[in-house]
């Protein structure tokens, strides 16, 4: 199951893609890892999906990553006496702590933390931004607002606050229960919603205690100003364009996507571009031209992964959506201009031994036009640092640790193989050639470059580069 593209595909599972046969088809079509959205998934269903994915993984012998996406806080209005009201532009509308059903002048807001944090001039977006209010008078009991963009408003519609820094945790009691259930089940990545600050990520990491990697979803404007700290605290980043596009002007989202992609790459953290990438394929077997261009843009930017949401979870054409995304990735990476775009975005290596070795390995591999760059990695960090350089040849990561292999499923350009750890340097070089030969990356007589840490098996010691020739049986020799 060697992929012919560097960018990875993250497919969300749901009603349209829950059984063994469909998950197998999605993997064959190009999905590298799967997302389980806890907004719509019970613990029992989550465990069933994980078991099914592991079944597919064992039958193909390739590590497959599993990402559990926590719901995060859901801020909603209370109920209306008539079920709904029509808000008019310019009218006054009050949000308050009174639990009485609302009318055209007021409604209950069951979130005292919002009333405490709101200030005059702050915007409130209702129902995914369809209705817009501006706070004019605020207190801990009520907020008097002016309707700037009116419309129909009904029970329990969502509330977004682009200007308000809410003093709430990114994890609700439901999220904590979901997180613990996911960790016990043995998932690889946890996507954290509603991240406003680095402390939100650190709070989750205290609970996780290394049992999974943490992906911070950037969907709140408050996170943008603290992005560097959030990236440092996280293991990966997700550009959650849906909610970001509700709380920020839509025209800002493309530039923020580029900035976040480059910041994450500079930090050596995987970055996933998500939401509405092939939205029309929920109902149509083919995407729009604009959607194809959108996916292609993420590939040109050097993102690590691109994500399908409802397209694969609830759409009519889940396999076609994955297959389409796969073809777009392959085609973009065949474009003669692709390498020059990727090279122009390459950040300078950080002043660490691991980055210096990764950058040197990339230069050697490209200068000698080698067919593969092979990493022996215990924790996965060597492969991540090499992937940061976006080398021209494919990266073959060999690890004795299945957990590391599954986490690497989201990392750009990495073909991961789980194998017994090398006994010594000769064994390491010889088996590196055999594995790359077996998986179709090299032919007999070609040379490969091997990156590893010595002593073997100790994480974070990337300090060695070897060039080896592949023999007629695939074994490599110095």
Image (cartoon, grey):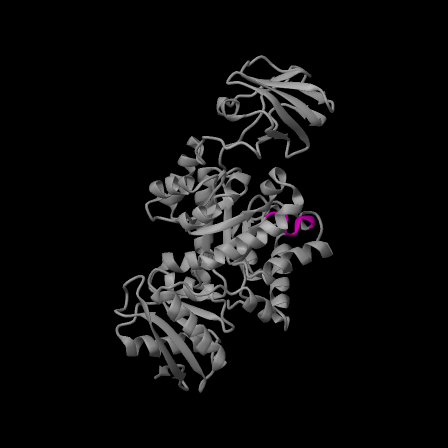
Write down the region rendered in magenta.
275-280
The answer to whether 279 appears left or right of 450 in the picture is right
Q: Position of residue 282 (x, y in %)?
A: 67, 47
Q: Residue 209, located in which quarter of the rendered image?
A: top left
Q: Relative to residue 60, is residue 70 depicted above or below?
A: above
Q: Residue 172, located in which quarter of the rendered image?
A: top left
Rendered residue at 65%/34% (across/down): 129
Q: Magenta: predominant secondary structure element?
A: loop
Is 380 in the magenta?
A: no
The answer to whether 202 appears left or right of 86 in the picture is left
**Which is more toward the observer, 461 or 439?**
461
Q: Position of residue 12 (x, y in %)?
A: 55, 48
Is 279 in the magenta?
A: yes
The mark tally for this picture is 0
Rendered residue at 38%/61% (across/down): 380
Q: Residue 179, located in which quarter of the rendered image?
A: top left
Q: Quadrant of the C terminus?
A: bottom left
Rendered residue at 56%/33% (across/down): 163
């Amino acid at each position: 199951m060697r992929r012919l593209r560097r960018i990875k595909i993250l497919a969300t599972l749901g009603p349209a893609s829950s059984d063994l046969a469909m998950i197998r088809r999605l993997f064959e079509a190009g999905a590298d890892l799967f997302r389980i959205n806890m907004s719509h998934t019970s613990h029992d269903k989550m465990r069933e999906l994980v078991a099914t994915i592991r079944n597919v993984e064992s039958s193909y012998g390739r590590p497959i990553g599993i990402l559990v996406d926590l719901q995060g806080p859901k801020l909603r209005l209370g109920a209306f006496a008539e079920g709904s009201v029509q808000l008019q532009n310019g009218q006054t509308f009050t949000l308050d702590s009174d639990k009485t059903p609302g009318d055209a002048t007021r409604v209950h807001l069951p979130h005292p933390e919002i009333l405490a944090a709101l200030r005059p001039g702050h915007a409130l977006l209702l129902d995914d931004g369809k209705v817009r209010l501006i706070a004019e008078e605020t207190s801990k009991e009520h907020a008097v607002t002016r309707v700037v963009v009116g419309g129909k408003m009904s029970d329990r519609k969502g509330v977004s606050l682009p200007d308000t820094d809410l003093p709430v945790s990114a994890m609700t009691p439901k999220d904590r229960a979901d997180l613990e259930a996911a960790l016990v089940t043995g998932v690889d990545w946890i996507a954290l919603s509603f991240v406003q600050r680095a402390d939100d990520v650190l709070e989750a990491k205290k609970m996780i205690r290394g049992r999974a990697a943490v992906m911070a979803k950037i969907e709140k404007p408050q996170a943008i100003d603290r992005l560097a700290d959030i990236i440092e605290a996280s293991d990966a980043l997700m550009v959650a364009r849906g909610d970001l596009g509700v709380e920020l002007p839509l025209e800002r989202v493309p530039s923020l996507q580029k900035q976040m992609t480059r910041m994450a790459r500079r930090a050596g953290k995987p970055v996933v571009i998500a939401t509405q990438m092939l939205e029309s394929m929920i109902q149509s077997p083919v995407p729009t031209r604009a959607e194809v261009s959108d996916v292609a843009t993420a590939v040109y930017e050097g993102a690590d992964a691109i994500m399908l949401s409802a397209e694969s979870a609830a759409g009519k054409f889940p396999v076609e959506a994955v297959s389409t995304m796969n073809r777009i990735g392959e085609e973009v990476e065949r474009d003669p201009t692709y390498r020059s775009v990727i090279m122009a975005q390459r950040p300078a290596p950080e002043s660490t031994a691991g980055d210096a070795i990764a950058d040197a390995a990339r230069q050697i591999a490209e200068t000698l036009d080698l067919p593969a760059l092979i990493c022996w990695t215990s924790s996965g960090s060597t492969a991540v640092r090499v992937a940061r350089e976006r080398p021209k040849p494919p990266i073959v990561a060999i690890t004795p640790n299945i957990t590391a292999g599954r986490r690497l499923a989201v990392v750009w350009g990495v073909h991961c193989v789980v194998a017994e750890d090398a006994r010594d340097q000769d064994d390491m070089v010889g088996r590196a050639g055999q594995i790359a030969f077996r998986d179709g990356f090299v032919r007999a007589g070609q040379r490969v470059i091997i990156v590893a840490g010595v002593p073997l098996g100790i994480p974070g010691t990337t300090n060695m580069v070897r060039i080896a020739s592949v023999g007629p049986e695939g074994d490599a020799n110095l």
